[in-house]
């Protein structure tokens, strides 16, 4: 089911890693400030959340982790099935789990994710608990729960960086995951760290501006492909 996923991600990551750099911003404080979207009427977390690669050693306390999973817990889901599970590896409180998750990351992610004090795997339950029928919305629901998690993380001053570049097979093997569950993503979590925590290549790209497609390219009205704005 996951054939070649690891090599696909390694390829994508190295391709996206071409020559663009931003050397104007030299400290993480400057970089962090530059990432703020400052969009009026946005809730604060939408303006300030971004995905850093440089994390500090500061551990994430268990109380905050509990609040983050509480945020995930209150996400909506199809038939209120709540098809999410999480595996937490904390360098300070569950180092064995941390190493087992780290082991599943593709090398380009390992190079920076090693700075993060916490790694979290999200998983979906593929079949409905009540009927055993396939839940085609399960992955969607897990993504939404992670969405709640990362916005709450921002609210607590924490930063997250999700990764698809990992091997689900290694997660399944390392944690003996039951058949009905599918690893979806791995997330690095922690406090922002300084640029010298990163290999040079990554440090020079940390300050690149955040970018998105224009709304007109994906918000349509009566005619597919035609902007409604
Ligand atoms: C499902 C998913 C998979 C991702 N995989 C990776 C990854 O393997 N490596 C990586 O460095 N970033 C990864 N990212 C982070 C995205 O590249 C990042 O969220 C995107 O560029 C937007 O940047 P922002 O989060 O700072 O707004 C992933 C994000 C998501 C949601």
Image (tube, grey):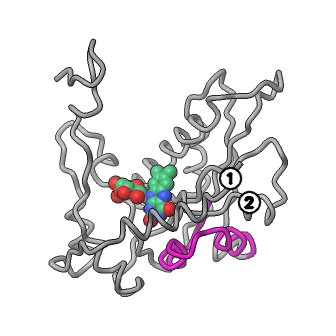
Decide: few, some or many residues near mark 1? Use Cα within 10 Å; few <14, some 14-19, many ≥20: few
Above or below residue 177? Residue 17 is below
At a point 36% along the width and 78% down the height, the residue shown is 202
| Distance from Cα at disc 2 to Cα at disc 1 | 7 Å
- Residue at coordinates 16% horizontally, 23% vertically from top-left? 229
Q: Which of the two residues, 28 or 161, is positioned nearer the viewer here?
A: 161
User: Is residue 23 or residue 25 the one in the foreground?
Assistant: 23
Q: For the residues labelled 2 and 1, say whether their Cβ atoms are less than 8 Å apart.
A: yes
Q: Element under label 1?
A: loop
Q: Which residue is mark 1?
A: 2
For ligand 1, give the image quadrant: bottom left
- Tell me which numbered mark, 2 or 1, is placed earlier along the sequence: 1
Q: Is residue 222 magenta?
A: no
Query: In the rendered view, does 41 fall on the left or right side of 74?
Result: left
Per the image, label 2 sits on a secondary structure element best described as helix
- State yes or no: residue 103 in magenta: yes
Q: Would you name the residue on which mark 2 appears?
A: 169
Q: Which residues are magenta?
A: 96-120
The answer to whether residue 128 of the structure is visible from this angle is yes
- Number of marks in the image? 2
Q: Mark 1: is the Cβ under 8 angstroms from ligand 1?
A: no
- Front-lying residue, 140 or 153: 140
Percent x, y of residue 107? 56, 76
Indicate the quadrant where residue 191 lies: bottom left
Q: Nearer the viewer, mark 2 or mark 1?
A: 1
Q: Is 131 positioned to the left or the right of 15 in the image? A: right
* x and y percentages locating residue 99 in the rendered image: 69, 75
């Amino acid at each position: 089911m996951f054939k070649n996923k690891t090599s696909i991600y390694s390829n994508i990551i190295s391709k996206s890693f071409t020559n663009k750099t931003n050397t104007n911003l030299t400290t993480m404080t400057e970089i962090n400030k530059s990432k703020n979207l400052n969009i009026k009427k946005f809730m604060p977390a939408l303006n300030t959340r971004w995905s850093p690669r440089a994390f500090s050693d500061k551990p994430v306390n268990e109380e905050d982790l509990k609040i983050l999973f509480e945020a995930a817990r209150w996400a909506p889901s199809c038939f209120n099935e709540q098809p999410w599970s999480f595996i937490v590896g904390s360098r300070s409180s569950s180092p064995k789990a941390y190493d087992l998750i780290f082991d599943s990351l593709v090398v380009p992610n390992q190079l920076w994710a090693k700075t993060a004090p916490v790694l979290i795997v999200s998983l979906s339950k593929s079949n409905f608990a009540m009927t055993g029928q396939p839940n085609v919305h399960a992955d969607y629901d897990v993504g939404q729960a992670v969405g709640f998690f990362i916005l709450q993380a921002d609210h607590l001053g924490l930063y997250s960086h999700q990764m698809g570049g990992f091997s689900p097979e290694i997660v399944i093997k390392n944690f003996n995951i039951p058949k009905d569950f599918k690893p979806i993503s791995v997330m690095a979590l922690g406090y922002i760290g300084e640029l010298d925590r990163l290999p040079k290549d990554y440090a020079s790209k940390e300050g690149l501006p955040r970018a998105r497609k224009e709304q007109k390219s994906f918000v349509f009205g009566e005619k597919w492909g035609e902007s409604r704005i």
